[in-house]
Image (cartoon, grey):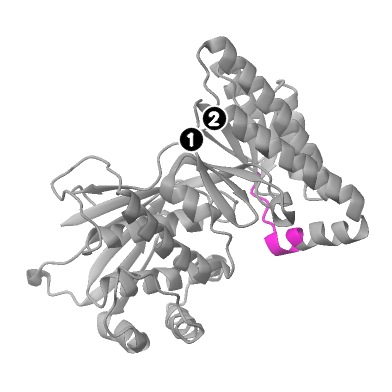
Amino acid sequence: MEVKARAPGKIILSGEHAVVHGSTAVASSIDLYTYVSLRFPTPSDNDDALRLQLKDIGLEFSWPIGRIKEVLSELDIPNSSVPTSCSTESIKSLAALVDELNIPEAKIGLGAGVVAFLWLYASIQGFKPATVVITSELPLGSGLGSSAALCVALSGALLSFSDCVSLDLGHKEWTTFGESELELLNKWAFEGEKIIHGKPSGIDNTVSTYGNMIKFRSGSLTRIKSNMTLKMLITNTKVGRNTKALVAGVSERTLRHPEAMASVFNAVDSISTEVASIIQSPAPDDLSITEKEAKIEELMEMNQGLLQCMGVSHASIETVLQTTLKYKLASKLTGAGGGGCVLTLLPTLLSGTVVDKVTSELESCGFHCLTSAIGGNGVEIRFGGSL
């Protein structure tokens, strides 16, 4: 029996950085996914290894099950119904196990993800052989929630073969989990995110688990339902950035200019609140949809200006902004800034010719463009099919 899970990436529609200082942020799922296939061998396969295939980058790893059990002797009897944090000692032991793989230096950042994979697998399924295949439509390290989508899809696939969820194994179409099952899955995914990021906010895995959109403020997450379909052009500048340094830079600027920055954060809070209100309000006809899109465009432009005030823009981001502005399109950075990705709202009435032109111009600058609807489904599962 084989199961395949998919989980979406995410964007921050408004409020990044300011959310650290008490403002509201709005995040949304996108229809770009990470896929995880899980298959257990039959007795006739005579296989006693856990195999991990990372199809997109052409890497494959395997571990004898006895070796994993030796490293994670503390697990004893895994309990998939109780999400468990990986201890510092276990992280060190698993990291040493991953170091033995001799991952190419250019891909060394994958190490923490492989550690998270091993912990989630052993904690939920125990010590049994299997083959896990991972593919993704999400660029790594670009602020689109690729690590959270991995942890969510992996947790979904692993839990589908546990006693904690009730699924129809004969169902061949994409289907979702029940509410209590999603809550458990989200908690497991968060444990994986903690291994990768240390102290994640929980926004990325929650959006990937439940889909649609969430509001986030002062540690409180609220799921919101969109009443309109928004389409975004997502431009990956391919410029790497140091998220911790960017966050620290905003904090330092706040210390130097407390009153001015307080006003910036208050303005961002108002923008996020209005964005959420517009998205949730009914749109009975095409005219009202067009009006709502125009308002969101203005709010995106305002948010971008405030992000520039915080000092988190970048020359590559400004190039995207100037290019899309020529086509009268509104854009803003999403995530940490300093590179990464830029969102451009594609209004309903915008012609495909214009989209093609702006995409071509951006890609001629060395950027990579993706088009995505936002606010779609969260994690889904499907049984059967091929790896």
| The N terminus: image quadrant | bottom left
Residue 292 visible in the snapshot = yes
Give the extent of the magenta segment.
237-247
Horizontally, residue 283 falls left or right of residue 90, namely: right
**Residue at mark 2:** 280
> Looking at the image, do the residues carrying marks 2 and 1 touch, with CB atoms under 8 Å apart?
yes
**Residue at mark 1:** 225
Q: Are there few (<14), some (14-19), or many (20+) residues within 10 Å of tag 2?
A: some
Quick one: label 2 or label 1, which is nearer the N terminus?
Answer: 1
Question: Tag on residue 214?
Answer: none
Label 1 sits on what residue type?
Lys
Label 2 sits on what residue type?
Gln
Q: Is 201 located above or below residue 62 in the figure?
A: above
Residue 281 sits in which quadrant?
Answer: top right
Q: Is 374 located above or below residue 387 in the figure?
A: above
The residue located at (74%, 26%) in the rendering is 325
Horizontally, residue 385 falls left or right of residue 321, namely: left
The residue located at (47%, 84%) in the rendering is 96
Q: Position of residue 73 (x, y in %)?
A: 33, 88
Residue closest to the eye, 277 or 140: 277
Residue 294 sits in which quadrant?
Answer: top right
Residue 319 visible in the snapshot = no
